[in-house]
Image (spheres, rainbow, N blue to C red):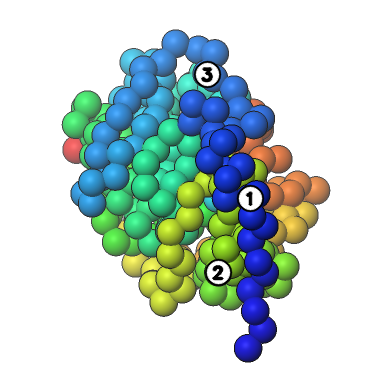
């Protein structure tokens, strides 16, 4: 049996010496609009931290970031702030990411994170809650929509169909290395501050669950996505129940390139057209 790569002696030490800076990653920025910080606990006791931008609307979008990302990374705050120009918005760090506790399980337990935030926002009186997820976050909101039936609409941005069968073989290899080797887990912690738990590919995957979702679903995917093949979005859309829509964005890549004002308008216009209020 081939041996796993040996972790250099200095790597575990340097990850403790240089962890996330106050929960922030390199390339992160704070929010520039008035917002409330919130801290909630999931059903299994993990602390989730996020931001809530209020505009006095009865609709809220909950943004769920991707793997090795966070609510503060790169284009995420700008996209959330752009959404907040038209609707109330919440964004949070998944377990194992950013300022939240716990370890990343790549959608298996992340549904509990989404559920905690949805329940928190529903308790504040919102009559229409739409979950928006990028990449891993998109796969998570699909699993959440099928298993919990608590949101009123679902939007995915570059979501994958099955964590055990990525159509991009390089993506599958990178994921397996991150979760399956000591050097991979140390690398994700050092470079992005992401703390990894166990990857379980035997869980029910988005592709097997998407047909159980009863809420309106919008699938958005970049034509030039080099991590998650657009065919995965097409497969998810094919199996989803109506009402459903699929948008392949021309000449656009994975995750961050989709976080712009055009995507914001596409999502908000779809919400107003397709997602009913909950009585």
Residue highlighted by disc 3: 31
Residue 158, placed above or below residue 131: below
Which residue is depicted at the point 26% across and 34% down? Answer: 40
The quarter of the picture where residue 272 lies is top left
Mark 3 residue element? loop
Q: Which is more foreground, mark 1 or mark 2?
A: 1
Which percent across, then down, holds residue 68?
57, 47
Label 1, label 2: how many angstroms apart (C-alpha)?
17 Å
Q: Are marks 2 and 3 in contact (CB under 8 Å)?
A: no
N-term-proximal mark, 1 vs 3: 1
Question: Foreground residue, 56 or 105?
Answer: 105
Residue 168 as seen in the image, left or right of residue 185: right
Residue 3, placed above or below residue 51: below
Which residue is depicted at the point 63% across and 74% down? Answer: 4
Residue highlighted by disc 1: 11
Mark 2 residue element? helix
N-term-proximal mark, 1 vs 2: 1
* Quarter of the image with the C terminus in it: top left
Which percent across, then down, holds residue 17?
56, 36
The quarter of the picture where residue 276 lies is top left
Label 1, label 3: how many angstroms apart (C-alpha)?
32 Å
Please tell me the numbered disc located at residue 272. Answer: none
Outermost bottom residue: 1
Badge 3 local density, few (<14 within 10 Å), some, or many (20+)? some
Residue 254 as seen in the image, left or right of residue 136: right
Residue 139, placed above or below residue 167: above
Question: Foreground residue, 64 or 9?
Answer: 9
Q: Which is more foreground, mark 1 or mark 3?
A: 1
Asked if one can make out residue 92 in the rendered structure from this viewpoint, the answer is no
* Quarter of the image with the N terminus in it: bottom right
Residue highlighted by disc 2: 180
Which residue is depicted at the point 29% across and 61% down? Answer: 147
């Amino acid at each position: 049996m081939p041996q796993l790569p040996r972790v250099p002696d200095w790597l575990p030490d340097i990850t403790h010496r240089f962890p996330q800076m106050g929960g922030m990653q390199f390339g992160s920025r704070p929010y520039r609009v008035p917002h409330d910080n919130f801290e909630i606990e999931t059903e299994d006791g993990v602390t989730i931290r996020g931001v809530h931008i209020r505009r006095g609307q009865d609709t809220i979008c909950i943004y769920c970031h991707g793997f090795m990302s966070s609510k503060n990374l790169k284009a995420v705050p700008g996209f959330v702030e752009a959404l907040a120009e038209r609707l109330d918005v919440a964004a949070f760090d998944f377990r194992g990411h950013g300022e939240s506790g716990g370890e990343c399980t790549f959608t298996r337990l992340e549904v509990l994170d989404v559920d905690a935030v949805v329940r928190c926002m529903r308790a504040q009186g919102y009559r229409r809650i739409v979950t928006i997820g990028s990449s891993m976050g998109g796969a998570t909101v699909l699993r959440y929509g099928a298993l919990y039936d608590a949101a009123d609409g679902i939007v995915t941005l570059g979501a994958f169909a099955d964590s055990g069968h990525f159509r991009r073989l390089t993506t599958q290899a990178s994921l397996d290395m991150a979760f399956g080797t000591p050097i991979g887990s140390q690398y994700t912690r050092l470079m992005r501050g992401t703390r990894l738990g166990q990857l379980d590919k035997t869980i029910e995957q988005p592709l097997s669950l998407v047909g159980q979702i009863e809420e309106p679903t919008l699938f958005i995917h970049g034509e030039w996505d080099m991590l998650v093949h657009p065919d995965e979005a097409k497969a998810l859309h094919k199996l989803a129940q109506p009402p459903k829509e699929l948008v392949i964005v021309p000449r656009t890549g994975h995750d961050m390139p989709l976080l712009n004002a055009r995507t914001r308008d596409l999502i908000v216009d779809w919400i107003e057209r397709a997602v009913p209020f909950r009585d």
